[in-house]
Amino acid sequence: MCPVRWLLVFVCSASLLGERSQSSRHGRSAESLALQVYRVQLDTTKGRIVIEVNREWAPQGADRFYELVTSGYYDDNRFFRVVAGRWVQFGINGDPAVAKEWRGKAMPDDPRKESNVRGTVAFAFAVPNGRTTQVYIALNDLSSTQDAQGFAPFGRVVSGMEVADALNSEYGENSGGGIRAGKQQPLFDGGNAYLDREFPRLDRIVRARVIP
């Protein structure tokens, strides 16, 4: 191979390694780096929900969701906050040790690019740069309340909105509520055992996985 071609190979390799190193520092795997758009299937006790994630909408949120899904974090999660016509929320792991570990892993905010219309999916948060693991699906057009507060959709439901609409909402805000309400500590302390004892009819995610 001629010297010029060797030089080109070296420069390209160094550039790729640098990009991977930078992505690692920001918590992104080489695999997720290539996934500008991907789909996640939630197998729930009511049926399947498919979410299409787009990194252009909210890169930090898209990468975190990918990490959580592929690590199995959302498997066996309860839909602990379901308000008919408003939202469905999940994202507190059923194992208190796992939930505690991730509770402290806040990520930087994404600037909001998309509106919180029906079917969009966004991370919940209480303070700026405070998003961790909790996610909600908008069951209605929530742009009038959520957009101005900075909730940044990273994806949208492309199949199974009828499933999201059918998730058990009898407990409403009483089975944990939103982060800002300050009533979630029993969920972090007791996990699924607490929810199953106090709110036994909550629907749940059986399995969450990335699909082709």
Image (cartoon, rainbow, N blue to C red):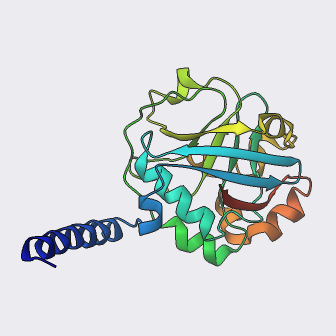
Looking at the image, the residue that sits furthest to the right is 201
On the rendered structure, is 161 left or right of 138? right
Which one is in front, 42 or 143? 42
Q: Up-down: is 86 above or below 126? A: above
Which one is in front, 13 or 111? 13
Q: In which quarter of the image is the N terminus?
A: bottom left
Q: Can you give x and y, in whole percent of width and height, for residue 102 in the image?
A: 54, 68
Residue drawn at the location 81% of the way across and 48% of the way down: 48
> Is any part of residue 29 visible from this angle?
no
Looking at the image, the residue that sits furthest to the left is 3
Q: Can you give x and y, in whole percent of width and height, for residue 8 in the image?
A: 15, 68
On the rendered structure, is 11 left or right of 59? left
Q: Quadrant of the C terminus?
A: bottom right
Q: Up-down: is 73 above or below 1? A: above
Residue drawn at the location 68% of the way across and 70% of the way down: 189
Residue drawn at the location 62% of the way across and 75% of the way down: 98
Find residue 117 and report its image quarter: top right
Find residue 14 and report its image quarter: bottom left
Q: Can you give x and y, in whole percent of width and height, for residue 10 in the image?
A: 17, 75
Q: Can you give x and y, in whole percent of width and height, for residue 109 in the image?
A: 38, 47
